Image (cartoon, rainbow, N blue to C red):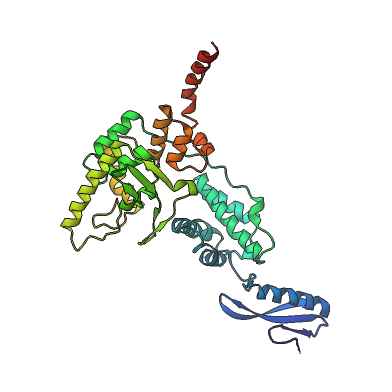
Amino acid sequence: MGKRGNGEGSISRRKNGGWMGQYVVYTAEGRKRKTVYGKTRKEVAAKLAKEISNRESGLTFDARNLTVGGYLDLWLRDSVQDTVRLTTYQGYERVVRLHIKPALGRVKLDRLTPAHVRGLYRERLEAGLAPRMVQLVHAILHKALGQAVNDGLIPRNVTETVKAPRPVKKEMRPLSPAQARTLLQAARGDRLEALYTLALTTGMRQGELLGLKWEDIDLEGGILQVRRTLSTATGGGFGFNPPKTAKSRRSIRLPELALSSLRRHRRSQLEERMKLAGLWQDHDLVFTTGVGTPMSRADLITRSFKPLLRRAGLPDIRFHDLRHTCATLLLSRGAHAKLVQELLGHSTIAMTLDTYSHVLPGMSDGLANTMDEVLG
């Protein structure tokens, strides 16, 4: 066996007259010796040089033995976990664990085919998974396999030739003005009354409300600054992240209805802190658990919002529909779409107009009347 230098591998002639080259890689399972074969020494030397180059570039996975499930675990850990928001990582991990690995986890990464992927999507749809969620499965798998292609582990991304199901747009269910007033009346005296008042009057997102701190609110000047969102980790813990987009970092002038509610909430919270001296954990948060710690989104929905809807006799809407209610009420009363965009923190006015186009047909009569007045 002819040595080519430390770390460069070796080339030798086989008993059948062919040639082989050997080199070492370090895989997730440890150090392994790999072999390439060829009819001539030149052919093997070229293959060996390519493999060693890949090794030096960090492409040291044993792709021939790596399963889809094993690769996805590595991808989540090395390429996703520290590069996205906590909630985004948790969503990726959940999709991989619940939907991709059970079906494709044992398939060898380099043996994965478009047929495997189509079968996954069909099986998930037939199991009752919503088309929008299957599209998310597609997006995550596409992204992960794209990284595998870039790393030289597989020659192509098999999801490129597979179409994801067309998602059904979630129905928007904004409250009417009368229903919105009913909700606020039912929330009167509730520990989170101010949260619901802010949700309806400012259209703030759930994470923005739960990440709100008293330092962000000027109760005298009537200005609120959206500076962060709260992310709660699965199994406990929490973190703060910047707002969803650059436009989401915004200043909001508060209506008197919201200011009055916040002042009452501030007084009540100070009383809670005095009663729980020594137990209260101060994070300066506006909306908290009973001991001052951050409130999870799930607890807000199951322990407060859904019971509030039932007490008020209102439809079983999503919390996000309070944001839609805010925008719909403003646009239906003639508020300029640009101002609504800035209030909601949409990245573009096109997003606002597309999302709330259902309000615009009712405003067309006003346009026609205006034209009659100008030219009639």
> Which is nearer the eye, 198 or 16?
198
Q: Nearer the viewer, residue 278 or 93?
A: 278
Quadrant assignment, res 184: top left
Displayed quadrant of residue 340: top left
Q: Is residue 126 visible?
A: no
Left-right relation of 219 to 139: left
Eyeballing the image, is 222 above or below 114? above
Q: Position of residue 142 (x, y in %)?
A: 60, 55
Placement of 33 over or under 339, stated as above or below: below
Locate residue 187 relative to residue 119 in the image: left or right: left
Up/down of 263 relative to 282, above or below: above
Instruction: Kindly indicate the quadrant of the structure image that contains residue 13.
Output: bottom right
Q: Relative to residue 50, is residue 216 drawn left or right?
A: left
| Rendered residue at 25%/37% (across/down) | 186
The answer to whether any part of residue 3 appears in the image is: yes
- Front-lying residue, 56 or 340: 340
Which residue appears at 36% of the width and 52% of the height? 211
Spot occupied by residue 204 in the image (x, y as percentages of width and height): 39, 43
In front: 222, or 193? 222
How far from the left and from the top, in percent, is residue 170? 47, 39
Residue located 52% across and 66% down the image: 73
Residue at the left extreme?
Answer: 275
Q: Residue at x 24, y 46 (%)?
A: 265
Q: Locate residue 366 relative to residue 202 in the image: left or right.
A: right
Q: Is residue 31 above or below residue 122?
A: below
Q: Give the percent coordinates (x, y) of residue 102.
A: 51, 60
**Image quadrant for the C terminus?**
top right
Which quarter of the rendered picture does the N terminus lie within? bottom right
